[in-house]
Amino acid sequence: MENVARPWPALWSLVIGFFMILIDTTIVSVANPRIMEGLDADINSVIWVTSAYLLAYAVPLLITGRLGDRFGPRKLYLSGLVVFTLASLWCGLSGDVETLIAARVLQGLGAAMMTPQTMAVITRIFPPDRRGAAMAIWGATAGMATLVGPILGGVLVDGLGWEWIFFINVPVGIAGFILALRNVPVLSTHRHRFDIPGVVLSAVGLFLLVFGIQEGETYNWGTIAGPVTVWGLIIAGLAVLALFVVWQRFNKGEPLLPLALFRDRNFSLANIGITTVGFTVTALSLPLIFYYQLVRGLTPTQSALMMVPMALISGGLAPVVGKIIDKVNPKFITAAGLVLMAVALVWNSALMQPDTPILLFLLPSAILGFANAGIWAPLSTTATRNLPPRQAGAGSGVYNTTRQIGAVLGSAAIAVLIQARLAAELPGGGPGGAAGEGMALSGGLPEALHAGFATAMGQSMLLPAGVILVGAAVALFFAKPQPVQGWGGGLPGSAKVDAGLDTAG
């Protein structure tokens, strides 16, 4: 552990920036109609406003995690915050959709520079046996940002205009920079050889895979241009990533992705778990928001406010869970949280009928709050507990990469399932049919389509419920944490991993 006298101010300073960048993964969704109107853009162009951010955010995470090890997490975090804040200003000032997309790419790169550093700093300034409370704050931030994004977006769009979902980042970014500059310590750096082939292979492979998944629905899972198809891109991405893993295995220098990290059972399983969480949290909101707005006629702000119980309970319980997971085996809390999330989603699915009293949906929202509180902190603590200091950035980069890939998979999968269920439940329910026409209606669907549409949305909710149950099953195989006598000293797994990793000068 690094000798840091005041770790908590450092954590809170980092949380401000982390919260801001995660909000920007969801805040744009409620502003899309206004952006289309304000910039005279079509739907495909507006989809790219979100897709460009997700791609630029997900692809470099492995690289930026390692750069934080090499040049210092504080330096890379502050640099990323400057890029993100300036890009946010550019987004708000954009006069056409092409400029907005370019600004969102830059914004995503800034976010990718920042995210691994937040987790790496926590790993290095808090000892493993007291890291639970810190990770609870980090985890609650991640969970609540997914909820606050649509709520804040609805309020800003309705009150000030779509530009303000980006302008608001500027004062927050400046405040976050000043606080991080003051409170985040300069940590020791670790000399790393830069794995150029690994950087190229990982970036190309992730880009092809994420682009194919993210844009599959846009191109109807068919041809993009000439002989290039969506499935061709996905298969090529998987092939390049397989080649990347082989290169990491046989690289005689220092690999970008230390495969020895995965010798730690809990690190490997936690990465599977956070992938299912990223998938589910992204997938659950789309059918729910469609149901609220198109069947029940709620405004963007009103529909987002239905998630307030989840946000309040999750935030309130986070410190309690943080104290508990330092003393008990986190696998039971994690598994219980994941099962509760599945229960809440199935409950929502059953309630999604045209005449269900709207206030009943606050009950599964509250259950989701309890679930969130039991998921984020225990998972992140389990993943990082045995990480050696010199690999904190690399491990954080891997963990956040798997979370983002899970989110992209969830976004793509739920879009495909919604389309299929609408085609089955509505007359002419395919693209351009009744469903497509109904989704374009700002005042909601024609009443004749309410029952079929609600049924389709309820059926779609069962997909993320099933995926999160896979995460619950995985969590049951977490190994019990060993007593800690110091920074990794009492952890056989940590010693083993460190010995396998410490190959560079």
Image: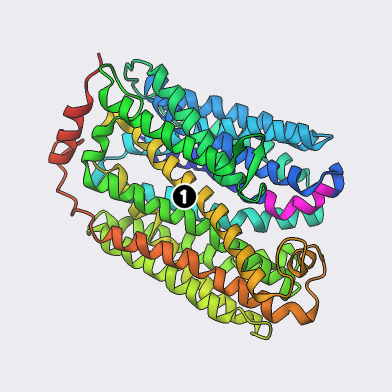
- Res. 146 image quadrant: bottom right
Q: Position of residue 207 (x, y in %)?
A: 53, 34
- Res. 498 image quadrant: top left
Q: Position of residue 18 (x, y in %)?
A: 52, 41
Residue in the foreground of this view, choosing between 71 and 432: 432
Q: Is residue 98 magenta?
A: no
Left/right placement of residue 386 relative to residue 191 reads: left
Q: Residue at x 47, y 52 (%)?
A: 278
Quadrant location, the C terminus: top left
Q: Pointer 1: residues within 10 angstroms few (<14), some, or many (20+)?
A: many
Q: Position of residue 203 (x, y in %)?
A: 48, 28
In this picture, which residue range is highlighted in magenta?
28-36
State the count of labels: 1
Quadrant location, the N terminus: top left
Label 1's element? helix
- Res. 414 image quadrant: bottom right
Whether residue 234 is visible to the viewer of this picture, yes or no, is yes
Residue in the foreground of this view, choosing between 256 and 481: 256
Q: Is residue 274 above or below residue 310?
A: above
Q: Which residue is mark 1?
A: 406
Q: Is residue 107 above or below residue 33?
A: above
Q: Position of residue 116 (x, y in %)?
A: 44, 35
The way the protein has been coloured in the rendering is rainbow
Left/right placement of residue 495 relative to residue 277 reads: left
Query: At label 1, which amino acid type do we have?
Result: Gly
Whether residue 4 is visible to the viewer of this picture, yes or no, is no
